[in-house]
Image (cartoon, rainbow, N blue to C red):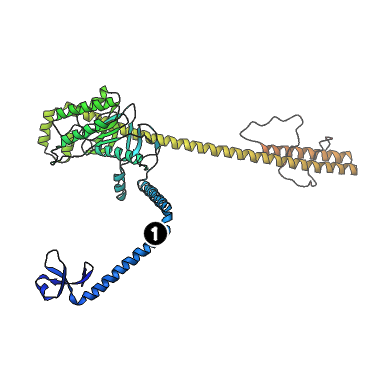
């Protein structure tokens, strides 16, 4: 059994459809099967249909009643719905920021791009799953250098650089956090214009070059000084000399308009554009000629080489054809570009070594600072210990003087003879001398010059506090009596 149009039906092969009494409600896509409602189930199907209709009417009645109860809260419900949508939007932005490790840069109300460690969001998201590393992009555009002309080898990262700029700038101006260093500066642009990819159309009779020209025409018509334009493979798609001349004329026009932009090209005349236009700057995608692979690093300030022959060798192109091409083009330009690239690679290596040296200097400075702090703490503790020792020694001397005074009083009371008094005086002098030596040794600071004793030195502390016993030497300071 199956249901067709809300009725229970039996699938019957088409040749046998006349053998079953009933209504045909449907047939299969191939027409080999028909779905017949037998006459025996007419009444049951009708009753089922009535019950379904009754159920639908009851649902409508319940919903209508519930709606009438909350109708007066419709404005609040709309506000709650809007609020929930806002919360969901914020949550979505937060989850995306966490996934991309995105940050909020310094947002300035001007046209500026001072980026550090910018990452292509889609590449970063995909590479994160396979533990691959995305090479970060460092980029600077401002009123002093508004137009960046990027050149370099194919598959060297020029187009990815353009897409990174477009995506991150659009993300920021859409209210999203962006995957770059939080110390970066990002500005606000009035409009974006992007021309990349192949948009040829047979229906509209557009070739690759004509579609590019049409897009650039629209850009020029709507561009303002606050616009940002991104053009990939500028001037390509036609005869090189004519395409390069056309591209240079267009670039001259947008340069005078004061707009900001980034273009990629292989044309030599566009690489020389910055020589006569101070607010334009070249950029090169670096290539390791020793490892024969692109580095995907953008270096502003110099044009890049296309490395046509090196890439041909890498993919296994016949050597005879490559040598013939080199002979036709000449080796002077090739040698010059290789020399420039080698110098650039050496600069990168020197920069790495300099960073290592700076890190070592920082670690050494930190070590010295830690050592100095520990030394100062040790000196403070040493002085505190000596101070406490002196105080304790003074206290011991005071206690000893009290005992001595008591002894003198006892001598006077018993009226000792002069011989006995001399003996006691000698013992007291000896005790005084030993006590002074011990006190000086206890309280002396080796790192500092010892103090000059006064004519009448104060009693010096001793190392221990104990009652005077028979045989000890004592001094009566008040009467200088032994």
> Which sits in the foreground, 281 or 186?
186
Image point 31% across, 66% down: which residue? 56
The answer to which image quadrant residue 391 occupies is top right
The answer to which image quadrant residue 460 occupies is top right
Percent x, y for residue 315?
A: 16, 41
Q: Is residue 253 left or right of residue 316?
A: right
Q: Which residue ends up furthest to the bottom in the rendered image?
A: 40
Q: Secondary structure at mark 1?
A: helix
> Which sits in the foreground, 199 or 457?
199
Q: Which residue ends up furthest to the top in the rendered image?
A: 276
Q: Which residue is mark 1?
A: 67
> Which sits in the foreground, 11 or 384?
11
Q: Is residue 71 left or right of residue 151?
A: right
Question: Vertical placement of 466 versus 445: above or below?
Answer: below
Is residue 150 at least partly visible in the picture?
Answer: no
Percent x, y for residue 346?
A: 29, 32
The answer to which image quadrant residue 65 occupies is bottom left
Percent x, y for residue 274?
A: 26, 25
Image point 15% across, 66% down: which residue? 28
């Amino acid at each position: 059994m199956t249901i067709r149009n809300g009725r229970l039906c039996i699938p019957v092969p088409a040749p046998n459809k006349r053998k079953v009494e009933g209504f045909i409600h449907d047939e299969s896509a191939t027409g080999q099967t028909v779905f017949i409602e037998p006459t025996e189930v007419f009444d049951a199907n009708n009753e089922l249909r009535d019950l379904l209709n009754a159920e639908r009417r009851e649902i409508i009645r319940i919903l209508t009643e519930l709606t009438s109860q909350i109708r007066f809260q419709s404005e609040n419900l709309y506000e709650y719905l809007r609020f929930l949508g806002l919360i969901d939007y914020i949550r979505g932005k937060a989850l995306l920021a966490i996934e991309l490790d995105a940050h909020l840069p310094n947002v300035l109300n001007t046209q500026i791009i001072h980026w550090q460690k910018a990452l292509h969001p889609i590449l970063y998201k995909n590479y994160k799953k396979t533990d691959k590393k995305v090479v970060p992009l460092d980029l600077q555009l401002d009123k002093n250098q508004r137009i960046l002309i990027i050149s370099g080898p194919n598959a060297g990262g020029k187009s990815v650089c353009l897409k990174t700029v477009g995506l991150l700038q659009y993300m920021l101006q859409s209210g999203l956090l962006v995957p770059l260093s939080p110390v970066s500066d990002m500005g606000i642009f009035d409009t974006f214009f992007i021309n990349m990819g192949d948009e040829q159309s047979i229906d509209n009779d557009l070739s690759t070059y004509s579609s590019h020209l049409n897009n650039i025409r629209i850009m020029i018509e709507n561009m303002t000084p606050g616009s940002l334009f991104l053009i990939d493979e500028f001037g390509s798609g036609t005869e090189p000399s004519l395409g390069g001349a056309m591209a240079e004329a267009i670039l001259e026009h947008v340069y005078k308009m004061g707009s900001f932009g980034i273009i990629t090209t292989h044309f030599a005349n566009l690489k020389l554009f910055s020589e006569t236009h101070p607010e334009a700057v070249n950029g090169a995608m670096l290539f390791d000629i020793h490892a024969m692979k692109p580095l995907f690093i953008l270096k502003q300030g110099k044009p890049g080489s296309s490395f046509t022959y090196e890439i041909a060798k890498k993919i296994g192109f016949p050597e005879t054809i490559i040598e013939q091409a080199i002979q036709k083009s000449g080796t002077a330009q090739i040698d010059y570009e290789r020399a420039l690239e080698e110098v650039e690679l050496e600069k990168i290596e020197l920069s790495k070594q300099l960073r290592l040296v700076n890190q070592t200097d920082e670690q050494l400075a930190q070590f010295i600072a830690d050592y100095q702090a520990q030394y100062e703490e040790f000196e403070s503790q040493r002085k505190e210990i000596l101070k406490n020792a002196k105080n304790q020694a003074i206290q011991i001397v005071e206690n000893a003087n009290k005992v001595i005074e008591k002894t003198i009083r006892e001598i006077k009371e018993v009226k000792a003879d002069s011989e006995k008094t001399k003996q006691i005086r000698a013992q007291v002098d000896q005790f005084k001398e030993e006590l002074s030596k011990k006190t000086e040794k206890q309280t002396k600071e080796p790192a500092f010059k010892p103090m000059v004793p006064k004519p009448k030195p104060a009693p010096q502390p001793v190392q221990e506090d104990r009652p005077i016993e028979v045989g000890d030497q004592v001094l009566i300071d008040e009467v200088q009596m032994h």
